[in-house]
Amino acid sequence: MNMEERTAYQSAFAMAQTMGATPQHLVATAQHYLKALQQEEQKFEKALSNQQESRIGAKRQEQQTLANTIKDKETQIKKLQAEIQEHQQKLGKLDGEIKQADASIANTKNDFFASYQNLVKQIQGDINKMQEYLK
């Protein structure tokens, strides 16, 4: 029905008066429904909060745990890379020391055999001279 708002309210109230309604009773009833709606809103907000916590909160917790795990693993990787680099440097140093020791041993061996052969040659020469001169 197309009527003014004031007329619509007055017509509805006239009909409600036949059932014993008063303006105070109608306002009190409307306020009662407002309270009921506010309680429903609170229940909804609580249910919504619970859903957010159970569906999103747990995933956020898992997300944070994974982020922490990644950070820990990255730290371990950096530590291992530093250890590998240190070991590689030590390996290179040992390689140099081995080559130097090997060269030193080879020189000692060469010097020994040169001295040995020289001494053997001298003694052999002395034996030959003794055999020749001491008959």
Image (cartoon, grey):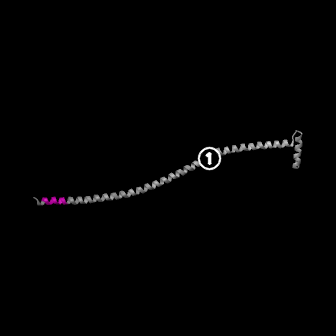
- Which of 26 and 105 lies nearest the eye of the viewer? 26
SS label for mark 1: helix
Q: Position of residue 19 (x, y in %)?
A: 88, 38
Horizontal side, residue 56 vs residue 33: left or right: left
Residue occupying the far left of the picture: 135
Q: Position of residue 64 (x, y in %)?
A: 59, 49
Identify the amino acid type marked 1.
Answer: Lys
Q: Chief secondary structure of the magenta span?
A: helix
- Which of 63 and 121 lies nearest the eye of the viewer? 63
Mark 1 surroundings: few (<14), some (14-19) or many (≥20) residues within 10 A: few
Q: Which residue is mark 1?
A: 59
Horizontal side, residue 57 vs residue 83: left or right: right
- Which of 109 and 36 lies nearest the eye of the viewer? 36
Report the quarter where the C terminus lies: bottom left
Q: Is residue 124 magenta?
A: yes
Report the span colored magenta.
122-131
Q: Which residue is located at x 85 percent, y 43 percent?
A: 24
Q: Is residue 128 above or below residue 57?
A: below
Horizontal side, residue 47 vs residue 111: left or right: right
Q: Is residue 76 magenta?
A: no
Q: Which residue is located at x 83 percent, y 44 percent?
A: 27
Q: Which residue is located at x 16 percent, y 60 percent?
A: 126
Q: Position of residue 4 (x, y in %)?
A: 88, 50
Q: Position of residue 51 (x, y in %)?
A: 67, 44
